[in-house]
Image (cartoon, coloured by chain):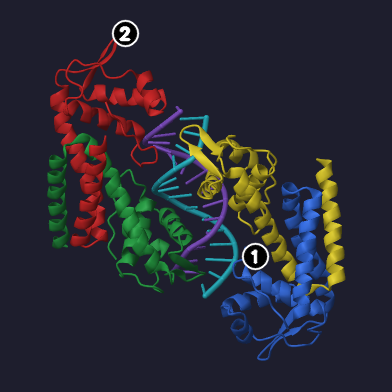
Chain colours: A green, B red, C yellow, D blue, E purple, F cyan
DNA sequence: GTGGTCTAGACCACC
DNA sequence: GTGGTCTAGACCACG
């Protein structure tokens, strides 16, 4: 599973983890019943404190996305994929809307459109490199 | 001048104010030599603590966008408009890039494109209403 | 507001704090709009780490019982009292049920009744002392 | 012998097992010299990890309630019934006291009494069904 | 090995 | 001053 944590972002790291695990489940990379990475494992992979990961996992459990199996780890809940597919779109729509909302104040429609297109193209280029 | 402050955003309020004043100057709503709203006035308008506004103004002064006129207030610096036009694009590009970066992880190119188009259309619709 | 934290209890401290603040709001000691004790203040009063209090507050916010006022503190939400009255009974019923459930396995009805009565009398005696 | 394990309880599973075996011995369901269920057997019956059962048994042995018979299993010690009768009341009194202690903070005496009575009635109804 | 809880102490944004 | 986030490291319960 691929993560991309922006340490400098205003979005807290634990929220980024929450979102990206939701993406992973929504896209089927992690399916129902699968174990998600252990707190310690992921904290090493992301170079992040274990507590930060644990906080993200706690939030995922609260949302019904994963369930904790005592002594074994966390597993994608039965309803996990369905919940995640719904939440994925909500999260992204929310974030995109937040940025565009401000951008609309700042730029005429055409300029904004152009800027967005440039960045979309750039991202897709990068994504293909992986 | 129009502001749109998101109290719940992860972006600090004072940064939102900084950005939106830069947008106002970049778009010519506030031109060189114009007085920007007083700290008190703006804090009332935005329902925000005066210190938060003051901090934003301090940052704007640091960037050379406005200059303080003792006893009168703050006015747009001579180079303000030029600086702001440059910064506007940087800020927006930065924010758009940040969102798309994560979104690219989450959604296939086409779905993302569609989502962005929907939200662009929605924003422009709203913007026209004003 | 009175707290009674059992450090040795199997119930986590932060849950005890959550429950007891809910009791305080349910009983009207803290009414809508009132500020609850600051994280630091309460952590000193309870001899508990500030993070533990913060975690309790976070949970209260999630339940819609309090809202965070940036830089000022946490305030009882408009719906707080209503939510708390509902949750108070649920929490207590849940805990009482848990204990009696096991006790019923262990003791004949009459003995259990007697034991409960003794402890009820004892508690009420103590409560009156305060 | 009847068990009632609450997986979601804050009380560790192994402690629940310890307590409930003590109840069984105290009530004479398991008398001196009787073999208690094997670790495997009980772990299957309770849907619990064998290590958890083993740990409970270890604790029971520590308390002198059972003794290990090499190659045969564990049997109720000679002093088992006496010890258990004493501990049963202590455990229950302790748990009941813990719950009532907090409940006294939360509810006026009469409401609490009523709530306890409701739950006692409910438990006894259920117990009679078995 | 797993997650859950707690402590201690840091820095930041905001009032 | 406030809460929010993060790090570091400890102990516990469970498998």
Identify which residue, D7 or C27, lies in the foreground. Answer: C27
Left or right: where A53 falls relative to D24: left
Q: How far across and how far down the image is residue B13, in percent?
A: 35, 33
Q: In the figure, residue D93 lies in which quadrant?
A: bottom right
Task: Kindly tell me whether residue A44 is visible in this rendering.
Answer: no
Residue A2 at what x, y percent from top left?
27, 63
Height in image: B120 above or below A28? above
Dot 1 surroundings within 10 Å: few (below 14), some, or many (20 or more)?
some
Callout 2: residue from which chain? B
Quick check: B43 above or below B126?
above
The residue positioned 27% from the left and 56% from the top of the image is: A4
Question: What residue does disc 1 label?
Answer: D11
Q: Residue at x 69, y 65 (%)?
A: C98
Q: Nearer the viewer, mark 1 or mark 2?
A: 2
Can residue D92 be seen at all in this image of the molecule? yes
Q: Disc 1 versus disc 2: distance between alpha carbons?
A: 67 Å
Q: Which mark is residue A17?
A: none
Residue tagged 2: B71
Residue B32 image point, x, y percent: 16, 18
């Amino acid at each position: 599973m691929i993560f991309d944590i922006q340490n400098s972002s205003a979005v807290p790291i634990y929220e980024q983890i929450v979102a990206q695990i939701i993406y992973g489940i929504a896209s089927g990379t992690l399916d129902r019943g699968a174990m998600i990475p252990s707190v310690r494992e992921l904290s090493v992979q992301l170079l992040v404190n274990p507590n930060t990961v644990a906080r993200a996992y706690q939030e995922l459990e609260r949302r019904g996305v994963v369930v904790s199996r005592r002594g074994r780890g966390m597993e994608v809940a039965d309803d996990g994929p369905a919940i995640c597919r719904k939440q994925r779109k909500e999260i992204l729509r929310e974030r995109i809307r937040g940025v565009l909302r401000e951008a609309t104040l700042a730029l005429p429609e055409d300029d904004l459109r152009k800027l967005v297109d440039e960045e979309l193209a750039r991202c897709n280029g990068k994504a293909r490199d992986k």
